Amino acid sequence: MAGQFEALPGGGAAVALDEVEISILRSLAVQLLELIGPGEEPAEDADPLAALFAEGPSEPPSDPALARLFPDAYAKPETEQGEDEELREFSAEFRRFTENDLRARKRDDALAVVRNLDALTVTGEGGAILKLTAEDSLHWLGALNDLRLTIGTRLEVTDDDESGDLYRLPDSDPRKPMVMAYLWLGALQETLVETLMP
């Protein structure tokens, strides 16, 4: 079980984590929460129907990592040149009515990670077994994906990159710790996906 998720009977997953891994995962999840930003708390007397139709932003985020987490719905393929005003309007409209909910979901996923890690009891051997319900597994899957997207954007990883190049970075390269986190999160994500498959 060390280093990879395994399926639990009745749904859910478990993974053995040491204190360093717990600390890294928690720190990354908190940083993701800070990047996504706080949600707006509705007033006690707020109309729930009005909150459902509250408008969000219409422009994509300027931060490349946030733009990756909240991409345009109607982006033009990179092979096509020029700006299509109609596509921009469709994207703005879609973003205005979906981004708030998407942010809330991503925030809930990252919060679930923090809460699950905070609930762990580290043994005298310096580790713990994280056991997730089926619902928590879905939150973790979302958060792991968002963390990988964010780190990959910061590292400027593209679809054309060979992951083997990432393994060959010298220890002196300042990107090495983030690359190792990126690859580790990918392995966790892959094994968690496997536990959720029928």
Image (tube, grey):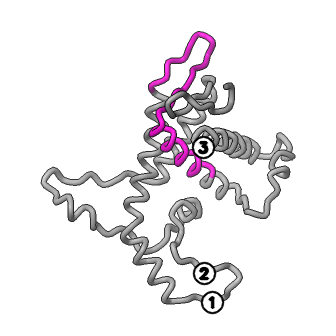
The residue indicated by pointer 2 is 76
Q: Quadrant of residue 195?
A: top right
Quadrant of the rendering where the N terminus is positioned: top right
Q: Is residue 70 above or below residue 36?
A: below
Q: Is residue 12 above or below residue 57?
A: above
Q: Position of residue 78 (x, y in %)?
A: 68, 79
Q: Position of residue 129 (x, y in %)?
A: 57, 22
Which of the two marks, 3 or 1, is nearer to us in this view? Answer: 3
Which residue appears at 48% of the width and 88% of the height?
A: 86
Amino acid at circle 1:
Gly
Q: Quadrant of residue 14?
A: top right
Amino acid at circle 3:
Met
Sequence-earlier tag: 3 or 1: 1
The residue indicated by pointer 1 is 82
Is the residue under label 2 in contact with that under label 1 (CB below 8 Å)?
Answer: yes
Q: Nearer the viewer, residue 133 or 72?
A: 133
